[in-house]
Amino acid sequence: MIENKACVSATSATKIKVSEAKSRQAVVLNPNKDEFHVVNFDGCVLKNQTAADRIVSKALVGDLIVELKGKNVKHAMEQIVATVSYLKQNEVAEGKVGAIVVCNEYPRTTSTIQVLKFALKKKFDCPVKVFTKDPEVEFEPSLGQTDLVVKKKGKKQPNP
């Protein structure tokens, strides 16, 4: 878990809204009212570095990276790669990882983006979904199948 309390807010809302002013939004559905943490990642946890906008985390389950983008989906993919790498290297991942990009670029996928999505899935088991309309997504089905950081003897260790 990311420890910077100024960048993290807890919520048990049934619809967790992730948005920015004058931008797209995503909603993570939480019908059981479980506790989630929303991390303001870009500009708070990481400053002046490539990073995704937000991370929605559920303790011991996983992290959903959310990038709200105008048009440059390729850059959004680069931000997701940087964020997943940070979670792994700093051993702060909650478990499985996934990502969504909300943009107004059309078409929402190109061969370049397909290659980047495949590379993320292969290297980190991080599925990426790209939306052109403000989506409502389920948390766990949006994650990969493998923990990003393996737990050994009570401590998290990066997955090879």
Image: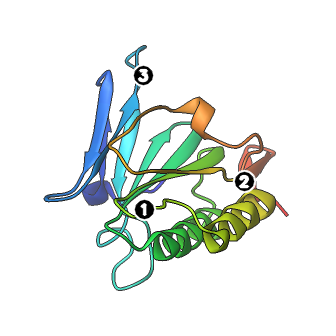
Q: Residues within 10 Å of mark 3 (few under 14, many from 20)?
A: few
Q: Amino acid at mark 1?
A: Tyr
Closer mark to the observer between disc 3 and disc 1: 1
Q: CA distance from mark 2 to mark 1?
A: 34 Å
**Residue appearing at x 64%, y 74% in the figure:** 112
Element at badge 1? Answer: loop
The residue indicated by pointer 2 is: 149
Residue 125 in percent (x, y) is at 74, 52
- Name the residue furthest front: 107
- Name the residue furthest bottom: 48
Could you tell whether 47 is left or right of 110 in the image?
left
Position of residue 93 relative to residue 138, above or below, is below
The residue indicated by pointer 3 is: 34
Q: Residues within 10 Å of mark 2 (few under 14, many from 20)?
A: many
Could you tell whether 19 is left or right of 129 in the image?
left
Q: Earlier in the sequence, mark 2 or mark 1?
A: 1
Q: Is residue 116 visible?
A: yes
Element at badge 2? Answer: strand
**Residue appearing at x 71%, y 69% in the figure:** 115
Position of residue 35 relative to residue 156, above or below, is above
**Residue appearing at x 40%, y 23% in the figure:** 30
